[in-house]
Image (spheres, rainbow, N blue to C red):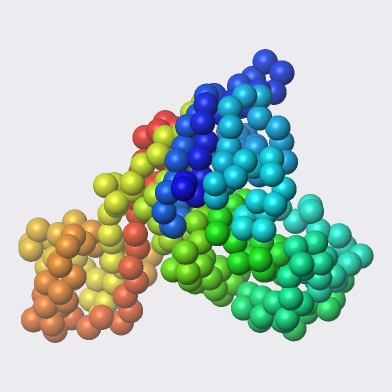
């Protein structure tokens, strides 16, 4: 049984074909990122997947059922933008409603609010929430039924770094437990942190690729002597750039240990070090001509 099966799917708006006879099959848990510029149809794609918008033609099956079968949403969830929230209700009210509709144990409200880090304000009215707090609530609503398939529309929008880290951790834990996630995002750096599987949407067509083919790994070093370090590493054949706080070095395979050995031999002190993974951005530039 496919987790997601899309066959010959099209969606037209008047004379514009937003989705053009697309096919997609996902058969195993994981995270797939849906990527494309604003206006390309990412939200339309997610809305059609979940039958919030009718397809012009074609079919969609979610966890083995037609997306038109409402019972499928006992195993499927969709995190939309915060326009679906009601300002005069509390976060608890929203979660209780989902539990009532899906006949879930109310104990899951306490579990999920603690899990996403919103237990301290879940009883407040949503109208008092910040953008990040609303994102926490939307995530709680989306995962309270422990879905097998989860659609996320810009899940990291409005999150501070701490919340973004927590959300990434939650998404990866969900995959470990068997959930399949399809998320749209503009944040290519965040995509590279959670998945190599990217679906580009261009001219109504899907381009599905493995970003590990394009992946590049860099390390940012804050060191005791920037100029000396740059000169030394370049002599050893490394590609080095001077950054705002130190140097940026392209690293392949097991080279990190070799670089730190160079530092040690030359008595260069590493004051700080940060890893950067780039992959989807380069491919995005190629596909969309940026």
- Across and down, in percent, residue 88 comes to 92, 65
User: Would you say residue 38 is visible in this rendering?
Assistant: no
Residue at the spot x=55%, y=50% of the render?
Answer: 63
Image height of 178 relative to 201, above or below: below
- Across and down, in percent, residue 7 comes to 51, 31
- Across and down, in percent, residue 248 comes to 28, 63
Residue toward you, 63 or 273 = 63
- Across and down, in percent, residue 229 comes to 18, 70
Image height of 55 relative to 136, above or below: above
Residue at the spot x=19%, y=65% of the render?
Answer: 230
Residue sticking out furthest to the top: 15
Left of 282 or right of it: where is 204?
right
Residue at the spot x=67%, y=68% of the render?
Answer: 144
Q: Quadrant of the C terminus?
A: top left
Left of 268 or right of it: where is 168?
right
Residue toward you, 160 or 134 = 134
Q: Residue 102 falls in which quadrant of the image?
A: bottom right
Left of 255 or right of it: where is 204?
right
Q: Residue 265 falls in which quadrant of the image?
A: bottom left
User: Would you say residue 280 is visible in this rendering?
Assistant: yes
Left of 109 or right of it: where is 230?
left
Image mark count: 0
């Amino acid at each position: 049984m496919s987790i997601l099966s899309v066959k010959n799917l099209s969606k037209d708006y008047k004379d514009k074909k937003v989705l053009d006879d697309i096919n997609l099959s996902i058969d195993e848990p994981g995270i797939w990122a849906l990527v494309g510029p604003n206006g390309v149809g990412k939200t339309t794609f997610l809305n059609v997947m979940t039958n919030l918008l009718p397809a012009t033609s074609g079919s969609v099956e979610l966890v083995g059922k037609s997306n038109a079968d409402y019972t499928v949403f006992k195993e499927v969830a969709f995190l939309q933008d915060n326009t679906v929230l009601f300002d005069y209700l509390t976060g608890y009210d929203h979660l209780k409603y989902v539990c009532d509709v899906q006949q879930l144990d109310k104990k899951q409200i306490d579990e999920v609010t603690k899990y996403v880090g919103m237990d301290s304000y879940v009883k407040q009215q949503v109208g008092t929430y910040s953008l990040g707090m609303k994102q926490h609530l939307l995530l709680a609503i989306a995962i309270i039924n422990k879905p097998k398939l989860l659609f996320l529309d810009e899940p990291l929008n409005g999150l501070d770094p701490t919340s973004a880290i927590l959300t990434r951790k939650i998404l990866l834990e969900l995959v470990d437990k068997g959930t399949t996630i399809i998320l749209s995002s503009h944040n290519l750096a965040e995509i590279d942190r959670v998945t190599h599987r990217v679906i580009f949407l261009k001219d109504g067509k899907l381009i599905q690729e493995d970003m590990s083919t394009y992946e590049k790994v860099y390390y940012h070093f804050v060191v005791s002597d920037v100029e000396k370090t740059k000169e030394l590493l370049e002599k050893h054949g490394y590609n080095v750039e001077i950054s705002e706080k130190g140097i940026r070095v392209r690293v392949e395979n097991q080279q990190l240990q070799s670089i730190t050995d160079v530092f040690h031999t030359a008595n260069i002190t590493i004051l700080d070090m940060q890893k950067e993974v780039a992959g989807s951005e380069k491919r995005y530039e190629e596909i969309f001509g940026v």
